[in-house]
Amino acid sequence: MAYGPMFYRHLISWPWLAWALYWAISAASTKTTQRREPLGSRLAHIGPLVVGAILLGWREVPWPWLAQRLWPRAALPYFAGLLLVYAGLAFAVWARVHLGRNWSGSVTVKQHHELIRSGPYARVRHPIYTGLLTAVLGTKPRRSAPR
């Protein structure tokens, strides 16, 4: 059965949308914040993230050197990228679930703050970042859907 390019594009965009929905919903059940990072500090690292997300999602980038193909258009690189997306997002979600109510989208000190050193935090220092970076590495091959 042959699928069109939109099907393959959705195989990568759907897990990202599911991840974002989970992230937004689970953010509502965190502990009370006692201290938060300054707004300037927050904007200093959110700004580049937003630019990166826009560039990843932008179909036709304005700078040709950003659109150069790293891998040939074939099934193997596409499915390897797809595997990275799913594995990376799953790892980030596992880390988020393991943090439970201690999670925060910004640098904060929570009420009854505790250091988590088990689960994914016993294996990797920053598992949410590790998972998201892994998923981002696999996201770019979406322009290389199999033929």
Image (cartoon, helix red, strand yellow):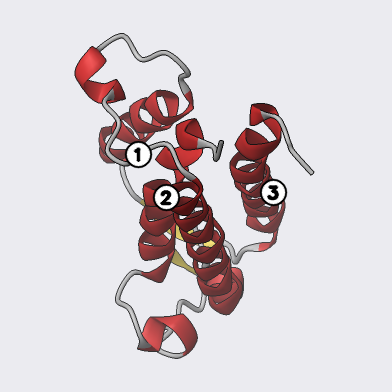
| Foreground label between 3 and 1 | 1
Q: Residue at x 62, y 52 (%)?
A: 23
Judge from the rendering whether residue 138 lies leftward or rightward of residue 2; answer left or right: left
Q: How many marks do you count on the picture?
A: 3
Q: Earlier in the sequence, mark 2 or mark 3?
A: 3
Residue type of the residue flagged with mark 3: Ala
- Please tell me whether mark 2 sits on a helix, a strand or a loop: helix
Q: Nearer the viewer, residue 56 or 27?
A: 56
Q: Amino acid at mark 2?
A: Pro
| 129 and 108: which is toward the camera | 129
Q: CA distance from mark 3 to mark 1?
A: 28 Å
Instruction: Tell me which numbered mark, 1 or 2, is placed earlier along the sequence.
Output: 1
Please identify the quarter of the rendering in which residue 64 is found.
Answer: top left
Q: Which residue is mark 2?
A: 77
Q: Are marks 1 and 2 in contact (CB under 8 Å)?
A: yes
Give x and y (percent) for residue 33.
51, 59
Residue 78 in picture, x, y percent from top left: 48, 47
Going 46% across and 59% down the picture, which residue do you hit?
A: 84
What's the mark number on residue 72? 1
Three-letter amino acid code at the position of disc 1:
Pro
Per the rendering, the mark at residue 18 is: 3
- What residue do we see at 68% from left, 43% from top? 14
Q: CA distance from mark 1 to mark 2?
A: 7 Å
